[in-house]
Amino acid sequence: MLGKFKTFKPYYKSTIVLAGPVVISQLGHTLVHTADSVIVGHFAGTIPLAAVSLVNAVFMIVMVVGLGIAYGITPLIAQENGRDNKEECAVLLSNSFWLNIITGILLFCLVYFGSMLAIDHLNQDPAVVKEAKPYLLILSLSMLPLMVFSTFKQFAEGLGFTKQAMNVTIWGNVLNIILAIIFVKGMFGITPMGVKGVGYSTLIDRILMMAVMMTYVLRSQKFKGYIQHFKITVIDKVRLGKILRIGAPVAMQYVFEIGAFAGASLLAGTISATAQASHQVAIQLAAMTYMMASGIAAAATIKVGNSYGNRNLFRLERFAITSYQLVLIFMLITASLFAIFNNYLPYIFTSDKAVVVIAAQLLIIAGLFQLFDGTQVVGLGVLRGMGDVNIPTIITFIAYWIIGLPSGYVMGILFDWGIKGIWYGLTLGLLTSSVLLYLRFQLVINRKKLQFEKSIL
């Protein structure tokens, strides 16, 4: 055992150093919505909290499409950097910039013309819908600055520079929390805005994060060797196609997974506003640990992509195994915390006793699916680094939409097990995804070994 640890020690250290800032950056996306839930739950009440749950269920689907498209550049940058091709990295950045701007505009239009109409036909509490609509509209305006921020963040992370995005995210979230409290509660002469207040705070936060991250990448000496080749007017169909061939499947992977959880939120809303608010509390806690695990997965993508770019399959496999081991350790710790403190953690979000009781029960289930959630997101990250995105996309669709959500509907609604039945279904979907993605990794790595051996011969 000690010998194995010594063998993998450099890989553990390298992955942790890279993953640490990415974990915090990834967590930042969730902390925005977590902070919104906490502030609204304490200062506005259960109906507004249910409205936040409903909006997050709708908006998260749209947001992860954008984040998936933006993510398409990261493995490509890691691979080209592994080949020391700085000029190609710069060309990829300019094409990603325009692709993400167009995506941000299209996604705003989708929310404005689509979701705002669809939200009336989701069989939700009318009082919740009334609170949700203005919040959804304001939040949708933040898509464009979020996409531009993600362009430069994913570029920097693809090169292995992760600390600046972490710093921007930390200060952005501090600002978001301060503004949200001021706007929601109504301080310094400002009229209390309720749910709309957290929308405005998020919009302001993302505009500032965009400006800071863009300035950092374009002005920092760390990127001078790359940015000297950067021309914002360079748009190339081949590069756009390369980014989309990775980004679009990644976006669909996000949609299938997040969409299933959003669907679970909508199913919870058909039970009661209390069940929906309880789901929001538990899912926000689970989402925080998921986003931290996705930071490990992002580091795996960078390390695997870099190793793949310079054809070092031995190093690639070691980083993949290390990432799986690290996420299992992390998720075992968080699962234990959920199980031990399940009766106390919901009070972070609300003081409503009925919501707390149900959320505490859901956290026990969340403790179980933590393990599957962590391993499946690392599996996706490893495969992305190798450029394998199409089959994993099919796997996520099967796991969440053929197995997870339907089984949650059967157990939760048809069998009348309530919100716990819906969460049992989600757990089953995560288990399916985790196992199938690991098997896919084993198949792909063995196939690549044979291909590389033949090319050497």
Image (cartoon, rainbow, N blue to C red):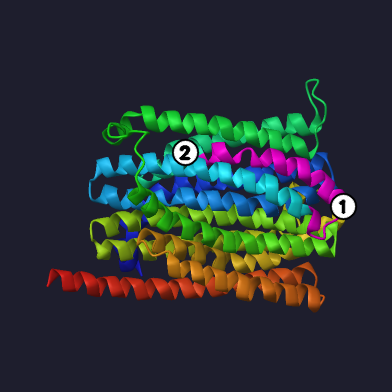
Identify residue type, mark 2. Ala
Q: Which residues are magenta?
A: 120-147
Q: Nearer the viewer, residue 305 or 18?
A: 305
Q: Which mark is residue 18?
A: none
For residue 455, side relative to residue 331 (left or right): left
Judged from the image, the secondary structure of the residue bearing numbered disc 1 is: helix
- Going from N to C along the chain, the mark reached first, 1 or 2, is 1
User: Is residue 162 visible to the viewer in this orientation of the structure?
Assistant: no
Q: Residue at x 55, y 75 (%)?
A: 432
In the displayed image of the protein, which residue is found farthest to the bottom? Answer: 415
Q: Read off the residue under disc 2.
A: 165
Task: Answer with the quarter of the image where residue 326 lies.
Answer: bottom left
Residue at the spot 86% in from the left edge and 55% down from the top edge: 125
Please say if 50 is above or below 182.
Answer: below
Position of the C terminus by quadrant:
bottom left
Residue 112 percent coordinates (x, y): 68, 44
Residue 146 magenta-highlighted = yes
